[in-house]
Image (cartoon, rainbow, N blue to C red):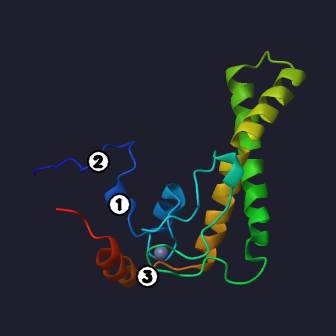
Amino acid sequence: MILTAPPCGLLSLCAMHLKDTKLYSILNFKCPVCHEGEFFQAHPYVLSKVGDLHANCPVCHVKYEKEIGFYTGAMYVSYAIGVAVFATVWVAMGVLFPELGVGAQITTIALVMLAGSPLFYALSKIIWANLFFSFDKSRSCAVGRSTAGPVQ
Ligand SMILES: [Zn+2]
């Protein structure tokens, strides 16, 4: 019996395996429909444009805002992310630094939440979009290659 190693390491996220999944769109901030166009106008830590979306996907031209106030529901996702990060940091501090006082714990959690808030805000919007948009492979290849094909 011949065993072959997988093309990617155990701990690395292999892009080949994630391509065409919602996780690929979320982790790369790509359009939830074509997975090629940028979802946000800028990186989440460009604070002047934090969370600003393109009106339409630059590749497949799908309208990102299905209706007025569509992304209001992303606050539920943001709340879930905030609670998950809070609990993770709190448990990690309890395990790694059990002698830490309450004041230091509160300060550490507040700093992590403050530093991560632009990222959590962006993640909540792209996760919310991925709940309501479906990947369409036909939109990713045909339109993407005709307008911005690879240079060879
Ligand atoms: Zn798209």
As drawn, 77 above or below 138: above
Disc 1 marks a residue whose amino acid type is: His
Q: Earlier in the sequence, mark 1 or mark 2?
A: 2
Quadrant position of residue 141: bottom left
**Residue linked to disc 1:** 17
At a point 32% along the width and 82% down the height, the residue shown is 142
Q: Earlier in the sequence, mark 3 or mark 1?
A: 1
Q: Which mark is residue 99?
A: none
Describe the element under mark 1 as helix, strand or loop: helix
Quadrant position of residue 63: bottom right
Contact flag, marks 1 and 2 (Cβ < 8 Å): yes
Q: How far apart are the alpha carbons under marks 3 and 2?
A: 26 Å
Quick check: 75 left or right of 36? right
Judged from this view, the residue extending furthest toward the top is 99
Image coordinates of residue 147 in percent, x first then y, are: 34, 76
How packed is label 2: few (under 14 Cα within 10 Å), some, or many (20 or more)? few
| Label 2 CB-ligand 1 distance < 8 A | no
Describe the element under mark 3 as helix, strand or loop: loop
Q: How far apart are the alpha carbons under marks 1 and 2?
A: 9 Å
At a point 61% along the width and 64% down the height, the residue shown is 126
Q: Earlier in the sequence, mark 3 or mark 2?
A: 2
**Residue linked to disc 3:** 136
